Image: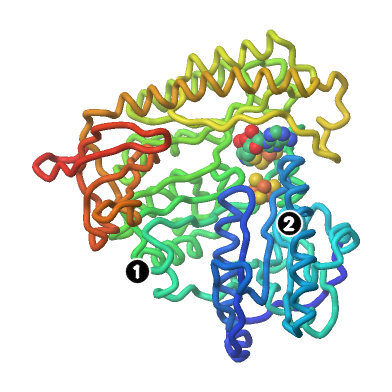
Amino acid sequence: MSTDTSTPTSPAEGQAAANTRKVFIKTYGCQMNVYDSVRMGDALANEGYVPTEEMEEADLILLNTCHIREKAAEKVYSALGRLRDMKQARHAVGRELMVGVTGCVAQAEGEEILRRAPVVDVVIGPQTYHRLPDALRRARDGQRVIDTDYAVEDKFEYLPVTDKARIRSRGVTSFLTVQEGCDKFCTFCVVPYTRGSEVSRPVHQILNEARQLVEGGVREITLLGQNVNAWRAEGPDGREWSLGDLLYQLAEIPGLARLRYTTSHPRDMDDRLIEAHRDLRSLMPYLHLPVQSGSDRILKSMNRRHTAADYLLLIDRIRQVRPDIALSGDFIVGFPGETDRDFEDTLRIVEQVNYAQAFSFKYSIRPGTPGADMADQVPEDVKAQRLERLQALLLKQQAEFAKSCVGKVIDLLLEKPGRNEGQVIGRSPWLQSVNVDAKTSQIGDIIPVRIIGTGPNSLFAEPAQDLVGT
Ligand code: SAH
Ligand code: SF4
Ligand code: F3S
């Protein structure tokens, strides 16, 4: 797929080239793209690029893209249209503007992007972003570079070690990708095609990165993977470790107060992981466990490889060991062949589980996936009506969950300054944003607070120093 055969740049080589250019990275899609954008920023920092929040100031604009639903790719092409005008205006005054497309649209569309969008200088897939600095050098020499190989080398080995000041500037919570790709091939989904097959990062790499983050002031780490609970690797004891084992090990790192992981597949929730929820105080009581549909017929046709009853049983087992766990999920309405009855089954499973939070989408045809060729595609207006009903139910549950928190004393990780002077925004164990009166010097602390009210997307709390947090 790639026309690029160059070898990756080593960090040392990268550091030698010193100049100052500004880079603006626009991130679309999931948390893995957020993580990738950070790591691309690190790779570019070693080339002398400094980050900017202002697109107008940038010498390099990267769109780190998502291909999961139709609109996502179209958004990228319309953004590229706007960048074309910007580049022309720049050239008129003799100023450079480089444009790169990275991420899942880059992987899926490849050459098509260069064809459709002449403004683009480089196209780099998610597995090769360690080669970005080299691609940019070549682009500056006038080439249009495309590199969407599934690289044989481990990109993480080539990415520069992040320095403490840079970690500190990013705040007290961090993502850490431990697993990439997917072998599950749900019939609606492009991820196995854009991110390739499942790969787990080795234990030592993950532990080193986690320690570095903590030394840089990070208090909470969210482990990431398209199928994070399919992570498997050899542990230091020679045994094959699963995600549960990894969490037990990470929980030993002094100063690392909170652990989370996302996104999980119900098929990969093994006993060890459930035990981790029982035993580890630092593993937060929040689980994103998408079910997609409540109809066995649709689940089968989606190739999810479990039934609604399997899912409910699993939720019961998890709630038994961690009764305060908040559940989150993803749903698709209007998958091909979905009848009113199938949809009612989805509403029923939502009622049975009672979610604290959830995402729901209209099925979007993805060319090249089996779902695209299935008969009985559901009309748009039916999808829209179903989505509306489902979202009303999910929002009601979310509001009820928020209300049930009022009066509770909880541990709050203070994250960033609030909108008003003297206020700080923190995260509850259940991932809610909480506003509280506190000093910005306390950011990074975990303090007990009492929840006193709810807003549309956040909670309000008062400090509860006199009480012990839950
Ligand atoms: N690996 C995760 C999901 C990753 S994609 C899992 O297995 O659960 C994130 C979410 O996007 C999915 O859970 C699904 O709800 C939604 N999604 C994926 N493909 C879609 C499509 N073709 N149309 C609509 N929603 C989709
Ligand atoms: Fe997509 Fe299914 Fe893989 Fe999740 S498990 S990334 S939905 S193919
Ligand atoms: Fe989108 Fe790629 Fe993530 S398709 S959801 S950015 S893995």
Q: Position of residue 95 (x, y in %)?
A: 72, 82
Which of the 4 quarters of the picture holds residue 4?
bottom right
The residue drawn where x is 62% and y is 84% is 14
| Residue with the mark numbered 2 | 79
Q: How is the image coloured?
A: rainbow
The residue drawn where x is 25% and y is 51% is 446
CA separation, marks 1 and 2?
38 Å
Secondary structure of the residue carrying numbered label 2: helix
Q: Position of residue 184 (x, y in %)?
A: 70, 38
When the figure is inspected, residue 124 is found, relative to residue 412, above or below; the finding is below
Q: In this rendering, would 452 be left or right of 172?
A: left
Q: In this rendering, would 397 be left or right of 18?
A: left
Which of the 4 quarters of the picture holds residue 370?
top right
Q: Position of residue 462 (x, y in %)?
A: 20, 41
When the figure is inspected, residue 59 is found, relative to residue 233, above or below; the finding is below
Q: In this rendering, would 321 be left or right of 90?
A: left
Q: Is mark 2 within 8 Å of ligand 3?
A: no
Q: Which mark is residue 426?
A: none
Q: Position of residue 325 (x, y in %)?
A: 37, 30
Quadrant, the N terminus: bottom right
When the figure is inspected, residue 371 is found, relative to residue 12, above or below; the finding is above
Between discs 1 and 2, the one toward the N terminus: 2
Which of the 4 quarters of the picture holds residue 62?
bottom right
Q: In this rendering, would 184 be left or right of 391?
A: right
Amino acid carrying mark 1 in the image: Glu
When the figure is inspected, residue 116 is found, relative to residue 456, above or below; the finding is below
| Residue with the mark numbered 1 | 215
